[in-house]
Amino acid sequence: MTNPKNAVPPLSLTAELTHRCPLHCPYCSNPLELLGRDSELDTAAWRDILTQAHEIGVLQIHFSGGEPLGRRDLAELIEHTAGLGAYANLVTSGLGLTESRLQSLVDAGLNHVQLSVQAADAATADRIAGTRAHHHKLIAADLIRRTGLPLSVNVVLHRENHDQLAAIIAFAEELGADRLELANTQYYGWALQNRSQLMPTAEQLAAAEPIVQDALLRLKGKMQIVYVIADYPEKYPKPCTYGWGARQITVAPDGTVLPCPAASAIRTLQLENVRERSLAEIWYESSSFNAYRGDDWMSDTCRTCDRRELDFGGCRCQAFLLTGDAAATDPVCHKSPDRGVVDLILAEPRRTGFVMRSPSR
Amino acid sequence: MTPRIRRGVRLSHDAVRNTPVILHPEGVLIPNATASAVLALCDGERSLTEITDLLNARYADVRPEQIRDLLDRLADKQVVEWT
Ligand code: SF4
Ligand code: SF4
């Protein structure tokens, strides 16, 4: 096997076990063409992926989706992960989490749960989820707390729930979260489709700052808070995690291997599938993982910029979605020749009425 | 003062990188030799003083402030907590 870009071993793998989900959140970053049950990998294939991932250095598995609880083999896959000595994290909406189901996951070796919450009150939350989801969060959080597992609560922020920020923080405290992630919507997949409806106002973003600062101080040592800002209004883009193809692998329900969860959006990328090639070869040799490693691919704007080691030129998926060129400087950056695209979007009148996430016909 | 490894944090050895690793909800940390030695002694029972004494028996000149500092940094990273 060759390693033309001197890549280092990956650290984590996101296993998108399924696209099926009982919720219909319009901010979902899953692709618009959701995969059905018949294209999902079977248990043996997932076990093999986990083993291969561990062999090339992966230490952490994030079981995600869709709703991973929709897979009957979840406990078996967690058990396999634990057997390898890797860390098993579950990213869930909490729907379908009963006491016995959770116990089977804990017995299998689950290490941590991330529970999504849509809003502070049932009416808003259920409207965003497109189903009666909110009351399940209380039950799920209580069950998780009783197992002694650490609990993170994840909330995606947008125009419909930004005004409730203080109440959302209080709700997470009530749920007994060890950690709260408040992430402004990133526009991929369904979220991109709903961007105009989701985009917070400048006033909302300004009002959020002191609320977050206050909570950070007040809850220090009790509940850790991570606030992910909205990048469009910023001067600099968000960093592409630790760099493209640097740490993480995502495997989609059908075995497509992605350098990041949103990467299927980049139509110019030649994605490969674990059914056809080993994970090691895909990690080290594939054109998709090598495409944006290092800085050779960068535009002159980024290649001559001091910040390139910090943000890696910003998000490749966003560059592609907004400029049509995945190698372009992230147009959020004020140095990008395409910054005008982002300013136009920010200035557009905002639409209302969500396109809810639903399976393709 | 007694340091304890937080819930959801696991200490492990990574064969690929041949190094001890700290696995926690947000990711992976690679501790240096001192941090590894200290963490291995954090059983939730031993106090800071006892840990320092044990380390002193093995290595020369371990100061309690040093260990306190290191554990405080690990506490900031949500790896340990004080009880
Ligand atoms: S390309 Fe964009 S979405 Fe993908 S990891 Fe980088 S920043 Fe995230
Ligand atoms: S020019 Fe490129 S590297 Fe520099 S700040 Fe902008 S996106 Fe980042």
Image (cartoon, coloured by chain):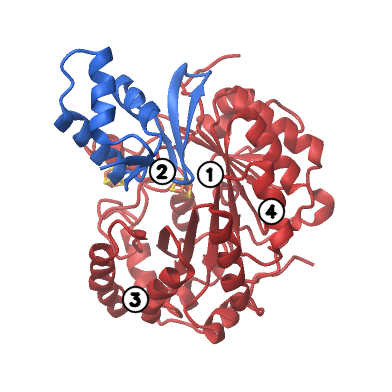
Chain colours: A red, B blue
Q: Residue under mark 4: which chain is it in?
A: A
Query: Is the residue at mark 1 in contact range of ligand 1, meaning its CB lies under 8 Å from it?
Result: yes
Which three-letter amino acid code belongs to the residue tagged 3?
Ala
Q: Residue under mark 2: which chain is it in?
A: A
Q: Are marks 2 and 3 in contact (CB under 8 Å)?
A: no
Q: Earlier in the sequence, mark 3 or mark 1?
A: 1
Residue B35 visible from this viewpoint: yes
Q: Confirm whether circles 4 and 2 share one chain.
A: yes
Q: Are marks 1 and 2 in contact (CB under 8 Å)?
A: yes
Q: Which mark is residue A103?
A: 4
Determine the CA span between mark 1 and mark 2.
9 Å
Residue depth check, mark 3 versus mark 1: number of the one nearer the observer: 1
Query: Is the residue at mark 2 in contact range of ligand 1, meaning its CB lies under 8 Å from it?
Result: yes
Which three-letter amino acid code belongs to the residue tagged 1?
Cys
Q: Earlier in the sequence, mark 1 or mark 2?
A: 2
Q: Residue under mark 1: which chain is it in?
A: A
Q: Position of residue A357 (x, y in %)?
A: 65, 70
Q: Residue under mark 3: which chain is it in?
A: A
